[in-house]
Amino acid sequence: MAELTGMRVAALVTDGFEESELLEPMGALEKAGAHIDVVSIKPGTVQAFRHLEKGLTVPVSRLLHDVTADEYDGLLLPGGALNADTLRALPAVLVFVREFQDAGKPLAVICHAPWILVSAGLVRGRRLTSYRTIQDDIRNAGGDWVDEEVVEDHNWVTSRQPSDLPAFNKAILRLFARQPAHA
C-alpha cells in the first residue's frame, strides 16, 4: 500500500456530491496516512446524495475562500451532477483547481467532476474519462474522452462512476504517492 503520511489533500465539494465518491477515496487516502480537509463554499455541513436519494451530511473542514492550493499536496473532486454543476460556475473554484494544475499536483476526479476541469479550461489535449453523459462536454472542450473505469494522464486520475471506485482508489493512491508531502 502507498505511504502518504504527511500528505494534505483538499476534497472540494458542496451540496449534491455523490456520497461514495467522497467517502471511499477519503477513507483510502486516510488509511494510507494522508490528512483530508473537506473544503466547501459554505460552512457547516454539505449534503451527500446516493444517486437521487439524500445521504449523509458531512462536516466542512475549511471554506474555499480561506484556503489556497499551496496548503495542499493534492485535490480530490468527487462527482454528483448538482455538486459539479454548482462548483463549475464559481470563479474561485476554477482558480483553485487551476492552481493545483499549474503546480503539477495530483488531481483525482470522478463522475461529473470533470465538468469543473472543462470550465477551468484544462481538458484540451488531455485523456480522461467521466460519467458517460458529459463525454460530449469533454470532447467539445478538446479532451480525449474514453470509456474506461480509470484513466491516468500525467497528474490526473479520472474515473466514471461509483462502481469504478475500487480501481479509482488504487490509482489515486499510486498517483498521490508520487507527490512529495508538505514539509
Image: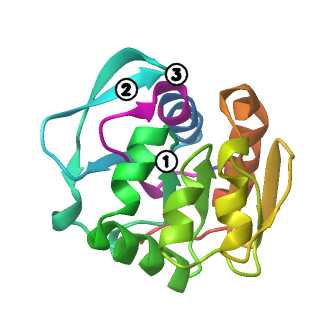
Q: Is residue 112 above or below residue 140?
A: above
Q: Amino acid at mark 2?
A: Ala
Query: Total marks drawn?
Result: 3
Q: Which residue is mark 1?
A: 34
The mark that comes first in sequence, 1 or 3, is 1
**Residue at x 52% of width, y 42% of height:** 79
* Image spot of residue 67 (x, y percent): 24, 66
Q: Which residue is mark 2?
A: 48
Distance of label 1 from label 3 (alpha carbons): 27 Å
Q: Verify CB contact (< 8 Å) between mark 2 and mark 1.
A: no
Can residue 1 be seen here? The reply is no
**Residue at x 52% of width, y 43% of height:** 33
Q: Residues within 10 Å of mark 3 (few under 14, many from 20)?
A: some
**Residue at x 12% of width, y 43% of height:** 43
Q: Which residue is mark 3?
A: 51
Under circle 3, the secondary element is loop
Under circle 2, the secondary element is strand
Q: Is residue 172 above or below residue 163?
A: below
* Image spot of residue 127 (x, y percent): 80, 68
Where does the magenta region start and end? 4-22
User: Residue 10 is drawn in which quadrant?
Assistant: bottom left
- Indicate left or right for 119 with 16 as reference: right
Quarter of the N terminus within the rendering = top right
Quarter of the C terminus within the rendering = bottom left
Distance of label 2 from label 1 (alpha carbons): 22 Å
Can residue 125 be seen here? The reply is yes
Q: Amino acid at mark 1?
A: Ala
Foreground of the two, 123 or 74: 123
